[in-house]
Amino acid sequence: MEGELARVVAELEATRAELASCNEALKSCRRIGIAMGILMERYKLTDQRAFELLRRTSQRRNVKLRDIAYQFTLTGSLER
């Protein structure tokens, strides 16, 4: 009984951690999508070109793409 309870608690904790990870991924995906939409409207880019611009900026600056997208949605600029 005690071993079963410990197993269930461990599974619950693992599920909570996975859910938190999924929530973070969803927030990142939304932020990237918003940044792409702004770029597409501002510069008349396709979604592929907007993503490529974010990706190249991320690589050039050695900053995670989600952080580039977040900064861009706050400042409207891809510069530092």
Image (cartoon, helix red, strand yellow):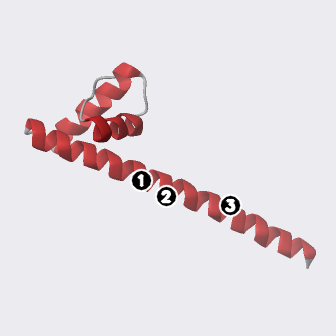
Q: Residues within 10 Å of mark 3 (few under 14, many from 20)?
A: few
How far across and how far down the image is residue 40, in percent? 14, 42
**Residue at label 3?**
14
Residue closest to the far left: 44
- 4 with respect to 50 (left or right): right
Work out whether residue 73 can be spotted: yes
Between marks 2 and 1, how big is the CA–CA gap? 6 Å
Indicate the amino acid at tag 1: Lys
**Residue at label 1?**
27
Q: Quadrant of the N terminus?
A: bottom right
**What residue sits 92% from the left and 75% below the top?**
2
**What residue sits 33% from the left and 39% below the top?**
69
Q: Is residue 45 above or below residue 78?
A: below
Indicate the amino acid at tag 2: Asn
How far across and how far down the image is residue 42, in percent? 11, 39
Between marks 3 and 1, how big is the CA–CA gap? 20 Å
Q: Is residue 18 above or below residue 65?
A: below
Between marks 3 and 2, how big is the CA–CA gap? 14 Å
**Residue at label 2?**
23
**What residue sits 19% from the left and 47% below the top?**
37
Q: Is residue 65 above or below residue 9?
A: above
- 6 with respect to 24 (left or right): right
- 35 with respect to 66 (left or right): left
